[in-house]
Image (spheres, coloured by chain):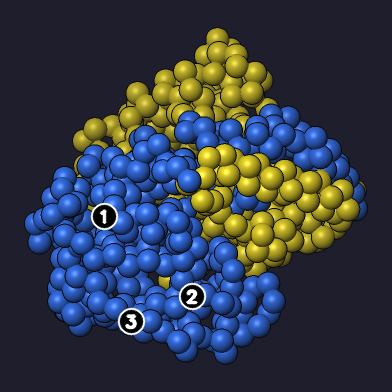
Chain colours: A yellow, B blue
Amino acid sequence: MTEPESAHGLSLLFDEDALAVFLADCWPEERFVFHGDPSRFGAYGAVFEEEDVEKIIREVGRPVDVIGTDGFRVTCNDPGEAMDYHDHHGAMIYLTGLHRYPAVRELCDQLSEDLRIPSRFVTCEGFAARKGTRVPLHFDHETNFMIQLRGRKRWEVAENDVLENPLFCYFPDKPDRFYRDGLDPYSGDLLNDRLPTDLETFEAGPGTVTFLPRGTWHGTVSLDDSFSIGFVLDPPTLLEIAMSHLSRELHSNPRWRAHPLYPVREDGGYDRVFRHEVRSILREISRTSGSGDADDAINDYRSSGPDDNTREYFVGS
Amino acid sequence: MTEPESAHGLSLLFDEDALAVFLADCWPEERFVFHGDPSRFGAYGAVFEEEDVEKIIREVGRPVDVIGTDGFRVTCNDPGEAMDYHDHHGAMIYLTGLHRYPAVRELCDQLSEDLRIPSRFVTCEGFAARKGTRVPLHFDHETNFMIQLRGRKRWEVAENDVLENPLFCYFPDKPDRFYRDGLDPYSGDLLNDRLPTDLETFEAGPGTVTFLPRGTWHGTVSLDDSFSIGFVLDPPTLLEIAMSHLSRELHSNPRWRAHPLYPVREDGGYDRVFRHEVRSILREISRTSGSGDADDAINDYRSSGPDDNTREYFVGS
């Protein structure tokens, strides 16, 4: 057994013994809680030292989501409106894009190296909540390191044995459209019939790091005014890695970049052309995938450059 | 030749003769300009009758992009800031999400029926510009019906013979990351060496409808204070239609939903496991695609329900 060449990022989250346990027994599938001295966070903890949540929202310059107890969720463009929910209505402010702070981006990049995840899939989010705010039990689709910076929070957590490798978060009180009527999108089973009964509870204080494997059930109550940040690992799925690689090759052919817009006047012509083209692209995918090279696909995934095959358009970047 | 069963939406855009020409000779690949009486727009024109752009921005409730002459582009969360660029700095306001107005959504749905494009891929955008505002020559990746509601605009347009079926918009003055250094992402050719020289110019006034096939070069100058809206047809590519269908099937297996997070301590273990899994999913895609059914893929595309395989997450919807 050898340590990863660098574990700079993880060494900031855990002490030496905890890091050894984490890497040997937990990563990537078992949850892990470590209580340490918050001073170890140094530069990136200092970014959020001031108590001024509104200032952070304005600096990051993105709309924020506000999450209330009974499934309430709203996006606020106006920082003042978000603060009103936070201060007076028991709602948590959920900030994304904290990796825009250089010190935070640096830690993201270190975790990216430590855990071999391309850095564009490692981001940082923040959670601000007044004392008494409750976020109900739910699971997310990403892997998280949650870091308590200010105040205490009571957690309840449980392993997810209802849905392996979820693609979307799930709130039992308010299933979104991917879990219509609270159903497992694959099996059709009612997810709420199988909520975890054996919850582990613990208290996080300033300096506590909680590693939450993908899909872990969790809920929190803030015991004080609380501010925490989460380092989020959200790489694509194995299928998406393969598909993205195949897309790069197949989208280089203008025929497969075509939109299905065909003449609509002649009876049947539309359907005939469309069906023929879809049949052709299915055959072409089969051929290309059958001769596809795993290392090329992995190189595409690792390449930190922009992905010409995605639809993302980052204005101004 | 038979007319489509319904051409409600197109009948609002064109008169009877123009509609026959459009369907016979233009759709989906040739541009077409029709000058008609703006009163025919009825209910959806009335939505934007007031001159108050800021009110529209606030009603739609989304951040807007502001686009200036020399490639300047910025996203404004604050409607007042956007109006300042619009009123005092010669920039155009680009509003998305106008299909949130019921009368506009209705026309989107009618165009969706007329042209056989699932309605979730038919949306409406708005363009507000003071007299003298210039938007430089560029091309987009969608198919558009541009409708001039207020003021006059001079257009210059040309067929795109440099890049068939583009996936992203291209501004020669400011290529974005998909056209790094102004290169064709597929051939590596310099796109700006082949800008169109044979531009057609025309003037649009209230009531003019301009059909712009995907990728058409276009630029505009506002001759008056101008407000126009665009009905945008942006379905997925043939490749994406096939991939989305395959994803629905393959993502039902938790193995292919896995993220590539593997132990990082043992030398070589990470690479070995990752390569094995990618090789396996490539083979599985080849098998599934080889036996894939075109009609099933087309049904997935047409289904108006939410797509369980996308990563979109519409908060609050």
Q: Are marks 3 and 2 in contact (CB under 8 Å)?
A: no
Secondary structure type for disc 3: strand
Q: Crowdedness of circle 3 by 10 Å Cα count: few (<14), some, many (20+)?
A: some
Mark sitting earlier along the chain (1/3): 1
Residue placed most toward the observer, A195 or B211 = B211
The disc, 3 or 2, on the residue closer to the chain's N-terminal end is: 2
- The first of marks 2 and 1 along the sequence is 1
Q: Are marks 2 and 1 on the same chain?
A: yes
Q: Amino acid at mark 1?
A: Asp
**B276 to the left or right of B223:** right
Image quadrant of residue B182? bottom right
Q: Are marks 2 and 1 in contact (CB under 8 Å)?
A: no
Tags 3 and 2 both on a single chain: yes
Q: Are marks 1 and 3 on the same chain?
A: yes
Mark 2, Cα crowd under 10 Å, few <14 / some 14-19 / many 20+, is: many
Name the quadrant of the C terminus of chain B.
top left
Query: What residue is pinned by disc 2?
Result: B159
Closest to the observer: A243 or B202? Answer: B202
